[in-house]
């Protein structure tokens, strides 16, 4: 599968990660999920391609934000499907990719 | 008795010693120096000398290199451990003061971002220079770090309505902190063992 779509999160969504839900303030994980991640992921699933999430210049990466976006996506579609259709890139801090992957693989872990 | 020793035994002993020396000198092995040396003999001698000089030198260098590599690895691990300790001390203060504001949450994010970079560097440095067993322990350490990040930036800490760190949350954070320290120590002792 090839990459056919990219979410440049710092440009399209905002440059700072908020917390998990809408009530936690702006730029929450849930907001990112509803407005960007879910619709674009569904398109990637239908079109059988990979959606690239570019995290460069995106500040902060709290687990609350990642759980509120990638965690929910993983619960809805399962980890295997999500990891098959999503690639996360962060050249400045590759650990962010691992963190997202970790939440996708363990969405319910507390 | 003294006369017997002086006039009979001493001349007899002297006689025997003289005969023995004469016999030894007469039968002394003779050496003939052969000035024709083969080129292979020269190579053999040179290589023996070279081995004698260089083997201890190379072994010493190898031991020194390994020791300095291990020291570097331990220094890197200590640095990372210190970063995590600083983060945890900060959380500890927030818990004790029963107060957390937006700035504290941002500070934690910044600190964890820098510890991210540290652990990435650390793992890439160590995995190039360590055994398979140490690599496995590094993976366990990384997972512990992810668990620590998960709980210390969870909604119970970063949520906008959160004004203080609750006892139960602090307990979970402390457990994960203990876990990551345990893993760091295991990696350290594995490096020392090797």
Image (cartoon, coloured by chain):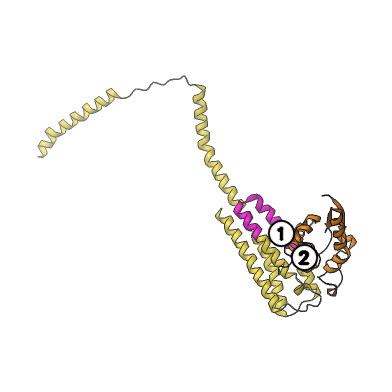
Measuring from the top left, give residue A78's x and y in whole percent: 76, 61
- Counting labels gives 2
Of the pair B30 and B93, the residue shown nearer to us:
B93
Residue at the (37%, 23%) spot, across then down: B31
Which mark is nearer the camera, 1 or 2? Answer: 2
Quadrant where the N terminus of chain B sits is: top left
In-image side of B158 versus B62 (left or right): right
| Colour of chain A in the image | orange
The secondary structure making up most of the magenta span is helix
Identify the residue shown where x is 57% and y is 59%. B189
Q: Are marks 1 and 2 in contact (CB under 8 Å)?
A: no
Left or right of B21, for residue A21: right
In the picture, measured across the screen, residue B12 lies left or right of residue A53, that is left
Q: Which residue is mark 2?
A: A75
Q: Secondary structure at mark 2?
A: helix
Residue at 67 percent across and 75 percent down: it is B171
Q: Colour of chain B?
A: yellow
Q: What residue sits right under mark 1 in the picture?
A: B118
Cα distance, mark 1 to mark 2?
Answer: 31 Å
Secondary structure at numbered mark 1: helix
* Magenta highlight on residue B135: yes
Q: What x and y, as percent, mark residue B20?
A: 23, 28
Observer-nearest residue: A106 or B15? Answer: A106
Range of magenta residues: B112-140
Disc 1 crowd, CA 10 A, few/some/many (<14, 14-19, 20+)? some
């Amino acid at each position: 599968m090839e990459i056919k779509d990219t979410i440049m999160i710092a440009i399209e969504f905002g440059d700072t990660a908020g917390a998990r839900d809408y009530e936690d303030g702006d730029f929450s994980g849930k907001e990112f999920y509803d407005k960007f991640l879910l619709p674009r992921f569904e398109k990637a699933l239908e079109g059988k391609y990979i959606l690239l999430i570019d995290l460069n210049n995106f500040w902060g990466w709290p687990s609350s934000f990642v759980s509120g976006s990638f965690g929910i996506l993983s619960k809805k579609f399962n980890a295997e499907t999500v990891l098959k259709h999503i690639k996360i890139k962060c050249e400045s801090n590759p650990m962010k990719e691992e963190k997202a992957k970790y939440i996708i693989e363990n969405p319910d872990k507390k | 008795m003294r006369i017997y020793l002086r006039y009979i035994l001493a001349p007899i002993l002297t006689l025997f010693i003289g005969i023995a020396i004469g016999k030894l000198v007469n039968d002394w092995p003779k050496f003939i120096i052969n000035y024709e040396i083969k080129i292979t003999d020269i190579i053999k001698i040179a290589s023996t000398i070279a081995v004698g000089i260089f083997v201890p030198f190379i072994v010493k260098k190898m031991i020194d290199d390994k020791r300095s590599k291990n020291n570097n690895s331990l220094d890197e691990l200590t640095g990372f451990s210190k970063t995590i300790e600083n983060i945890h001390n900060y959380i500890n203060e927030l818990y004790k003061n029963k107060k957390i504001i937006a700035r504290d949450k941002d500070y934690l994010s910044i600190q964890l971002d820098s510890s991210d970079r540290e652990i990435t560097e650390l793992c890439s440095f160590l995995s190039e220079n360590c055994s398979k067993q140490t690599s496995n322990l590094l993976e366990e350490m990384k997972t512990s770090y992810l668990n620590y990040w998960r709980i210390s930036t969870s909604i119970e800490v970063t949520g906008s309505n959160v004004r203080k760190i609750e006892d139960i949350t602090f307990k979970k954070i402390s457990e994960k902190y203990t876990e990551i320290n345990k893993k760091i120590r295991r990696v350290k002792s594995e490096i020392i063992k090797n």
